Amino acid sequence: MTLDTHQQKALIDLVRRAAKTEIMPRFRNLGAGSVRVKTRHDDLVTDADVASEALISKGARDILPGALIIGEEAVAADPAILGQMPETDWAVIIDPVDGTWNFANGLTMFGVILAVTYKGQTVFGLLYDPVMDDWIMASRGNGAWFCRPDAARVRLQTSGSKPYGELEGMLPLFIFPERQRERLAAQMAAQFGRLDCLKCSCHEYRMLAQGRSDFILSPKKNPWDHAAGVLITQEAGGDAVCLDGRPYAPTDHQGVFLIAHNKLSLEALREQLQWLDQ
């Protein structure tokens, strides 16, 4: 089961409209009180997050009547929403402004993420860049594509094989438990020449799908951050796995997991990092 092309286009148009009307007018134009703290000083929500999620949620209900809507801000207000995922057929998962810290601080590294799942399996993923008005999308079994308005879409492929020590990846060290950070930083710095963190899952997955990065390591499985990106990576030639060997699933929210450009690197990384899940 998947979405037809009309539903996919409607969701893309909906996200583009939310960016045009609710996100970009507020970029570098947030007034007093427009930025608020959620769980810690660097976990922020803005008026753009709230307005964008409201618009996309309403539109998604029209496009997929009866679907469970899982928005990041809605879950922050009511965590029980996530528990409904395993019992639902269709679900639309929304990160209305991914990279809110960047957005709130005037940096252009932010995006909108949308995923659609059917019976717990991601069937459609979208990584949208509001600044450039372009996007990467995938539907299960149909490849990953880079798209611009009024231009031919381009099929994407993850990076080719390379020696383990030459891999370049994304390491959001700040979201790992403090007790793990020192060992993890030392190990990864010793093994790899370049590690980055964009503070934006949307653009980290875009880099991976376009062959410009080789892996992402994450201790959190929030589906609004990862469901779309994992599907897109898989459709571009990569894969994802939990450190204990379980495959990634958007209904599984526990444990550290890896996403990599190919299965060989994925398993090599998992072997080196299994201690994180102990």
Image (tube, helix red, strand yellow):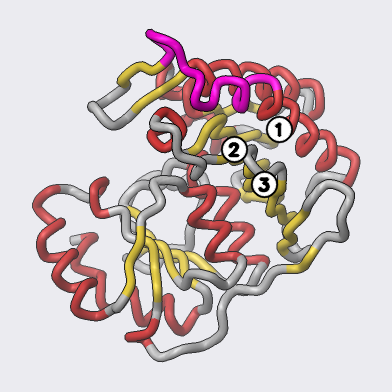
The amino acid type, in three-letter code, at marker 3 is Leu
Please state which of residues 75 and 181 is positioned toward the viewer in this rendering: 181
Percent position of residue 118, x then y: 68, 43
The amino acid type, in three-letter code, at marker 1 is Val
| Residue at 63% over, 59% down | 232
**103 above or below 190?**
above
Element class at badge 1? helix
Residue range (magenta): 21-34
Tell me how far mark 2 sits from mark 3, CA to CA: 8 Å
Q: Give the crowd class for mark 2: few <14, some 14-19, many >=20 residues within 10 Å.
A: many
Residue 125 shows up from this direction:
yes
Tell whether 226 sits left or right of 182: right
Asked which quadrant contains residue 169, the reply is bottom left
Q: Residue furthest bottom?
A: 163
**234 above or below 74?**
below
Residues at discs 2 and 3 in contact (Cβ within 8 Å): yes
Q: Considering the image in quadrants, where does the C terminus appear? A: bottom left
Residue 28 inside the magenta-drawn segment: yes
**Circle 2 sits on which residue?**
112
The amino acid type, in three-letter code, at marker 2 is Val
**Circle 3 sits on which residue?**
126
Asked which quadrant contains residue 147, the reply is bottom right
